Amino acid sequence: NPEEIEEIRLFAVPPEQTVVLGPEDAAQAAALLRGLRAYQPGYRLGDSLCGQYIAFTIVKTDGSEIEVSNTGNVALTIGGTGYRAEYNSAEALNAFANHVLYSR
């Protein structure tokens, strides 16, 4: 629920950078996060990182936090649980993250 979001932080490797999203970017990130398609709960990528790692930390108005990460557009971790990622929705989130990071 967008009214419950206090802040969204984005972290990515590469370029090993963290940014706090402004209101417009936070709204777009929230929409993309809601649109993620995940399946196969308990999925583990293994020890090798393939591609970029991005993580969005959502801080809610009650102070609780949830992290959603995307590794190489093939694996998602949502609140500590691993999933396989549907590529197109994960790629859209990754493209948005890179736009935010590299347009600053």
Image (cartoon, rainbow, N blue to C red):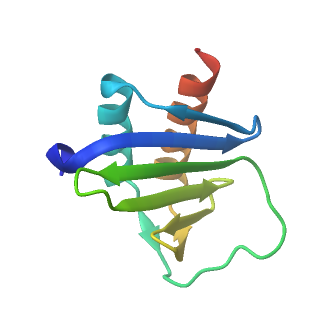
Report the quarter where the C terminus lies. Answer: top right
Going by the image, does 23 lie left or right of 102?
Answer: left
Q: Residue furthest right?
A: 48
Residue at image location 55% in from the left, 64% down from the top: 76
Q: Position of residue 81 (x, y in %)?
A: 50, 77
Q: How many marks?
A: 0
Q: Is residue 94 left or right of residue 29?
A: right
What percent of the width, then of the height, locates residue 7? Answer: 35, 40
Return the x and y of residue 70 as percentages of the image width and height. 58, 55
Left or right of 53 on screen, residue 83? left
Residue drawn where x is 77% and y is 39% of the image:
14
Q: Tell which of 27 and 40 is nearer to you.
A: 27
- Which residue is nearer to you in this view: 27 or 35? 27
Q: Is 34 above or below relative to 25?
A: below
In the orientation shown, which residue stands out farthest toward the bottom? 42
For this orientation, the residue located farthest to the top is: 104
> Please, which residue is most extreme toward the front here?
63
The x and y percentages for residue 69 are: 55, 57
Residue 95, image quadrant: top right
Q: Is residue 16 left or right of residue 27?
A: right
For the point 55% across and 55% down, the residue is 87
Near-viewer residue (13 or 71):
13
